[in-house]
Image (spheres, rainbow, N blue to C red):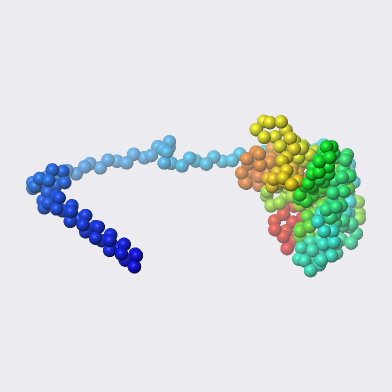
Amino acid sequence: QQCNLATLRLSIMIAMAFLLGAASVGPGATHQDNQPRRRMRAEPVKQRKAVPKVPESRDSKSREPEKQEEPKPKAIFVKPNYLQHLQKLGPIPKRVHVFFPVSDFAKHHELSMVQHGIGNLVHQNPDWIVQIYDEHEMDKVIADAGDLIPPEEEQLLLGKSNTNGDAQAAAHFAEKADLARLIVMYKYGGLYVNFDRRINIPLNQVFGGDNPQERTARLCLPTFQDINFMQSVMCSAPQNRLFKEAITRSTDLRLHGGNQHGQEKKPLERRGGWIHKNELYALGPLVYNEAVANVVFDGSISLSPKDNHSKEQTKQHLALARAALEETNGVIVTALDAGCNSLLSRE
């Protein structure tokens, strides 16, 4: 009813406005002077000459600017001195490291990620030692790394009391795991995998069997699609300086990365022991990829978002990097991780 009344009200207002307007002007009158109109003799309309259209100039604002082609990256190759460093190391040990808050989760074969991941890895590789670290064991890895990290970093991560006796909350599991995987790779070597990785290729097919001549691999650097080098799958011989470089970079960012607007450098801000998610990502994949670019490769490779490269440029960089790794005669193993097809799995 309200809509009907409003419509009726509107119709009445329009009608009144029309009637009042007609009365004030009168028949045959103009709005300007209210005088009767004179009939004017129609004059012939002069036809205008057609004006030819002027083509728009190249500098016209309406024209979209032409996209400039992105510069192609120059040649990328593995540093010869780093390759010599790897060749002096021993083969990759038959040892697997996995971090998970509960160490016995691999026994739960009813879980899909166990069936197609860690459970399958244990079943297919009886000659490999698989060690699953719970949070307490992972903390011990960090506590025993006094030769690699300073005491204040250990305090921040493990939540120990500082020199003043003030209690601190421990860091997030993921932050500790990012550092602990670098430590075990440097100290012990072997294979590190995230607990949720799909694995269905026997490791001896990837890294060679018991024959030392077949086990030429000293490092693996698979890429996650064409985005970056994977941090969820790492393998190396022990004492690989790549991982020591990554640990050093991680320490520097954790203890001195809180610099804001030119102020004095300080540790990253924490709330309840946890850092911001962006800083958590920086301490993980970004630190690792910057170390890879600095230690392993020579040339114009860039794997840091700070360089503001497009996705296409990053894709080109990683394609050239994989091609360079394939020229190391099996010393460095690489693969493109694309869904179920990766270094450790096939569809």
In x, y percent, where is residue 125?
Answer: 87, 61
Res 248 → quadrant: top right
- Residue at horizontal 81%, vertical 48%? 181
- Residue at horizontal 34%, vertical 64%? 3
Res 61 → quadrant: top left
On the picture, is 334 further left or further right than 278?
A: right
In x, y percent, where is residue 301?
Answer: 70, 40
Viewport quadrant of the C terminus:
bottom right
Up-down relation of residue 150 to residue 109 (above or below):
above
Asked if residue 63 can be seen in this view, the reply is: yes
For the image, the number of numbered tags is 0
- Residue at horizontal 12%, vertical 46%? 34
On the picture, is 305 further left or further right than 155?
A: left
In x, y percent, where is residue 107?
Answer: 84, 65
Viewport quadrant of the N terminus:
bottom left
Asked if residue 333 can be seen in this view, the reply is: no
Please tell me which residue lies in front, 130 or 16: 16
